[in-house]
Amino acid sequence: MAQAKNLINQATYTYTDSHNNSEFQGISSQIDIQPIQLIDPQGRILGCGGQPLSDYNGFSVGLYDTNPNDRTGTELGRLVSLTPTEFPDLPNNNVARGVQPNTTNSNPYILKNSSEGQYNFLLDPSKGQVTPGKTYILVVNPPQNSIYSQRRIKISILDNAGNTQNNIVRYLAASLDGQPISITGETSYQGTVVLIPNAELVGLNLFAFEFDVGMCQTQQVQIIKTGDRATAEPGDTVIYRLSIKNKSDVELNNLVITDTLPLGFNFVSKSVRGEFEGKAVTVTVEGQGATIILRTSVPIPPGKVLNVAYGAQLSPDSVRSSGRNSAIVNAQRMDNNFAVKDGPATHQLKVRPGIVSDCGTIIGRVFVDKNFDGEQQTGEPGVPNAVIFLEDGNRITTDVNGLFSVANVLPGNHTGVLDLSSLSGYTLAPNLYFRERNSQSRLVRLEPGGMVRMNFAVTPAFHEEVKK
């Protein structure tokens, strides 16, 4: 924090009243000069484990206003116009004294290896830059083609920013990329949001996370999901393989893999296998319907890969699913217990309906045919509990309305025979129009995925007397 003491020039005097011998003291004159006060939010860019980076060349830190047209307060506006400073301080030039390492209060500030990642910006209260409710975004830009990604920290000035006792500016710092902000200092955490009560003593500590070149976000662990086939049918078993690679600089432990299966994919619990460096490892399973949780206590050193495989069997419901299977991995760094994650990693399986899609349905009815045309009209009731035998020996019984149906029937020719012994008091009704329907059996041809009708017309065995 850049601050100079108030300058006071004054003379005091005392005198004694001769009448009552009382002594008085007074001030003859006073000049109170209030210097420029600049509030200094400072910090240091560190590695994920709190260690300095090996090279800071090309890194820059900038302080931005938020975009006034963005209601979320997360988009960048203009660079904050900071009050220029100097170091060493030259007297009587109305330029405030700067603070190491950013002695000129440049914005953005270009880091050097000599500063070991330290940076600072001086805010000017006279410009309203520490007014409660003021919001900034601190941006750390790595060099081009760096293994590090850009970081953004949102800083909101709190209500007691004008605390005059210690000249402390309190502010709320929230990570906009979901990564933690600080691992040291007197802070109270709420998720990835940090309350920093003393900008001069604590400051912000920013962490650099590893990630693959070309990726837009950090990545310390990587999960890849593959399957043993690209297409499958109901009844098939698919073998999935999960490869978890440690891409950080420390050991990872407490691995938890959450795998979400599509509709109709049934997890085969006894199929789980784990492998690390050619040796089998123990993987525990927690099943919650379509969500499978896989855990292992095996630590993964940097650059190493853990493989987990399991099987899932497709049910007929799988033809209605997307066939897309996704998995995420969560782990912890050994050095600071920070949580790392990656995913979802997906595998797209094309589900072919197979034999299920070729199957069709046979529907029909057994009814009393009063006009002997072989078709049911109004006033011709159905006959319940009639039995029809199919060519494979299966039997079907009609419902209370004389209706029956058989689903998932293979396409092709099928024969049904009416069991007259199940129809007490009825016999086959003669057909006056189609000679082939005078048979006790019916031959139908079922198309793939189609539907065919198989009706049986009956008549009372003893004709009722017709009233004249």
Image: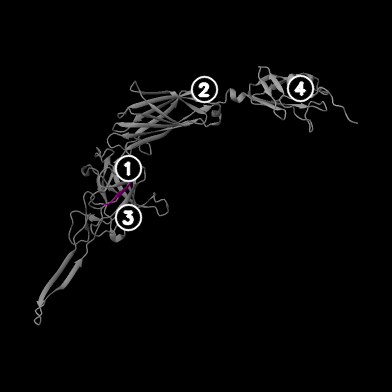
From what the image shows, is residue 259 above or below residue 63?
above
The tag on residue 180 is 1
Instruction: Give the residue at the far right of this rendering.
Output: 468
The x, y position of residue 303, in whole percent, is: 31, 28
Is 199 left, or right, of 407 in this rendering? Answer: left
- Give the Cα distance between marks 2 and 4: 47 Å
Q: Closer to the observer: label 4 or label 3?
A: 4
Between discs 2 and 3, the one toward the N terminus = 3
Q: Which residue is mark 3?
A: 158
Kindly identify the amino acid type of the residue bearing the numbered disc 1. Answer: Pro
Are dots 4 and 3 in contact, CB under 8 Å? no
* Quarter of the image that includes the N terminus: bottom left
**Left/right of residue 220 with respect to residue 288 in the rendered view:** left
- 136 magenta-colored: no
194 in the magenta segment: yes
Q: Image quarter for residue 248?
A: top left
Three-letter amino acid code at the position of disc 3: Leu
**Residue placed under numbered mark 2 in the picture:** 236
How far separated are the C-alphas under marks 2 and 3?
60 Å
| Residue 413 showing in the rendered view | yes
Q: Amino acid at mark 2?
A: Asp
User: For mark 4, what is the residue?
Assistant: 424
Mark 2 or mark 4, which is nearer to you? 4
The answer for how far apart the CA atoms under marks 2 and 1 are is 44 Å
Q: Secondary structure at mark 1?
A: loop
